[in-house]
Amino acid sequence: MTNEYVPPKVWKNEPSAGNQWANINRPEAGARFDKDLPVGEHPFQLYSLGTPNGQKVTILFEELLAAGVSEAEYDAHLIKIGDSDQFSSGFVGVNPNSKIPAWWITLGQSQSMCLSRLLFWST
């Protein structure tokens, strides 16, 4: 085959790959800018967007609340992935993979933890 794809020896970031999402893919990980995440009044903090994956945690919380689990009260905060909010220092601190959804639990004034990390380590 004469038109066989040969991967480059060194990958180059080409942000103008022709679509609106090409600019968010980069070879490096971590925060790209400093910005704190908002924190509400409830123990659970949800950082997400109304995408299929982003809706799953919201559905979970709403079903728990509908079942009478008052401890499932949460604050939802919008993460605009088109604006690269998931690459802020605050979001990367909660989810180093920069993927939505991310949950944060405040256990007390000085204790808090990332639930997605807890779920990862408990499986």
Image: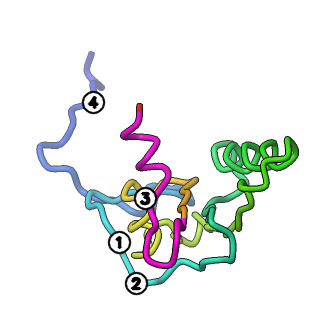
Give the residue at x 54% y 67%: 106
| Quadrant of residue 93 within the rendered picture | bottom left
Please name the amino acid that badge 2 sits on.
Asp
Rendered location of residue 72, percent (x, y): 72, 54
Marks 2 and 3, Cα distance to the nearest angstrom? 15 Å
Marks 1 and 2, Cα distance to the nearest angstrom? 7 Å
Q: Residue furthest left?
A: 9
Mark 3 / mark 4, whichever is N-terminal: 4
Marks 1 and 3, Cα distance to the nearest angstrom? 10 Å
Seen in the image, is 106 located left or right of residue 40? left
Q: 61 and 43: which one is in front?
A: 43
Q: Which residue is mark 2?
A: 34
Marks 3 and 4, Cα distance to the nearest angstrom? 34 Å
Q: Secondary structure at mark 2?
A: loop
Crowding at dot 2, Cα within 10 Å, few <14 / some 14-19 / many 20+, comes out as few
Mark 1 / mark 4, whichever is N-terminal: 4
Marks 1 and 4, Cα distance to the nearest angstrom? 32 Å
Q: Which residue is mark 4?
A: 5
Q: Which residue is mark 1?
A: 31
Mark 2 / mark 3, whichever is N-terminal: 2
The residues colored magenta run 106-122
